[in-house]
Image: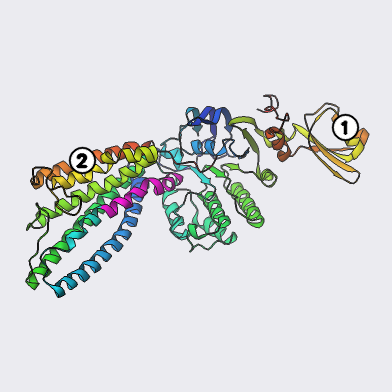
Amino acid sequence: MTAAASFAAPTTAGPGYLVGQVWPTARWLLGRSLFLALWFWGLVVVAVTAATVVVAVVGEPAISILAFARHGAIWFPFAVFITVSGAYLPVHVAAGLTRRSMALGAILAAAATAVVYGVVFSVLLVVERAVYSAAGWQWQFFDDLSAGAGPGTFVPASLVTSLVANLSGLLVGMAFQRGGGWWGTVTLPVTAGPILLVSALFAADTGPIATDTWFGGRGLSVPVAVTGGLLVAAAMAFAFDRLARGATVPVRAT
Amino acid sequence: MTGFGVQVRDLTVRYGPTTALDQVSFEIRPGVITGLLGRNGSGKTTFLSVAAAFRRGTSGAVLVDGEDPWENARVMGGTCLVRESGDVVADEPITENLRFLAERRPTFDRATAESLLDRLEIDPSKRPDKLSRGQRSAFGVVVGVATRAPLTLLDEVHLGMDAPARYAFYDALLADWMAHPRTIVVSSHLIDEVERLLEDVVILDHGRVLAADDAATLREQGLTVTGPADEVDAFVTSRRVVARQTLGRTAQATVIGTAPDDEARARAAGLELGAVGLQDLFVHLTDHAGDRAAAPLTPQESR
């Protein structure tokens, strides 16, 4: 058998592999995620601004309106990352890239997206608080841990929760990809449940999925909650990587 | 000669209770255009998927350039499987897809891709999901040819393409292969059309290999007899006739199997002999109607 002497693809995993496979994957997925993030936050700013004006006209704002976007900021990128396993995996493998590089690239993209969502959300909260302060309104973020707190509190809370949510999206998508509809659904408590768990670590009292009573009605201290959240994130990333390496690209026809 | 060779050893692939491939063994020579022929459900796509590391086999082995392709960065990077319309980013313009591939495929040639797009009359500003069925297939062809992978696997890429587009594809594939020799496997139902491209042929049927040999040897497994109808009928008496055509008093019959005195008998009867067409051989081998099911070619008939 004659080898293709002129072929110069990476022969082993190493710096070339990272540069040639993992980095392009992360950049591609991050680019698409940021494009959608632009739309998401653009709509949030428009909606929150309009709502604030309306509330100010009919009365006086007393709580953060932007805080209502918290669940959207968690579950929207979660849904975006679910599509990676179903829609992107065939394109990735068909482009001659390994599943391992897809997993690593997707985890990097999920982490970077979490930073973007966490930072944007925090910055917008600070801006909203400044606006409220300038107008003489009372600003309150209805999260036990973050109530009245500064960026030192809600920045890590937003970052870690976003990271876990994005990784959860990857994991949910891969569970459906590997196990089909039945197993994908049955495993949701394990694949999507960590979002609620980490929310509980920060004692989030928001929306219909309030978790503020899970740990005795109070959240843990920030360092403990961050550490716990990162451990959960690491376990999810590991599980996603292991599942992705064995994923089959569905056959369209035989 | 360049290109990845493929060795298939006792490969079995099952989908639940269904056996798509049943202990098949054959080889694909490096640097050769091989035709992978078979009816629907014969296991063609399954084999190609295993070779391209889209899925694992249940048992047995497939070696691409001597190595297991599964999660093998070198082998996967040198293998390009285009399934029907290709696995591309459907919601991004074709230009973006070309950039995507150029960043990931070390052998991808963007100039060739753009030239083929022009030749196949595909607007590069369009998104694949906005193209017609035939244009999507043509874009898959562009990806397969321009990637210039050492192992290029084209699975029914002609679906939906009209005749001019298909012939442009065949010409482009042959010209690019001659300029950049590599291993190409073409899976197709249009055997008459692709026959001229093929140096080797593998015929699958119900998950088994019916024949695997070079096309010339396969064509010698039978012959076509042309001449006066009554002389043709006499010549083919007691032989396996797989096709027969009549035009006025002239007839042409295709038979499987040859005899040492065929040429002498034909000369004496005023008949012309020719090689059997791959299409006729394929139909004969895969015809399961009634009692006409054909046995696989023997090892002497097929390597």
Q: Residues within 10 Å of mark 1 (few under 14, many from 20)?
A: some
Q: Nearer the viewer, residue A52 or A26?
A: A52
Query: Within the magenta stretch, is there residue B81?
Result: no
Can you identify the residue that label 2 sits on? A232
Q: Position of residue B243 (x, y in %)?
A: 78, 38
The colouring scheme, among rainbow, by chain, secondary structure or one colour, is rainbow
Q: Is residue A178 visible?
A: no
Q: Residues within 10 Å of mark 2 (few under 14, many from 20)?
A: many
Q: As drawn, is A121 to the left or to the right of B190? A: left
Q: Position of residue B12 (x, y in %)?
A: 52, 28
Badge 1 amino acid = Phe
Q: CA distance from mark 1 to mark 2?
A: 79 Å
Q: Is residue B83 visible?
A: yes
Mostly what secondary structure, the magenta segment? helix
Can you identify the residue that label 1 sits on? B235
Q: Quadrant of the N terminus of chain B?
A: top right
Farthest residue, direction bottom? A57
- Same chain for mark 1 and mark 2? The answer is no
Badge 2 amino acid = Val
Farthest residue, direction top? B299
Stretch of the chain drawn in magenta: A75-94
User: Mark 1 belongs to which subunit?
Assistant: B
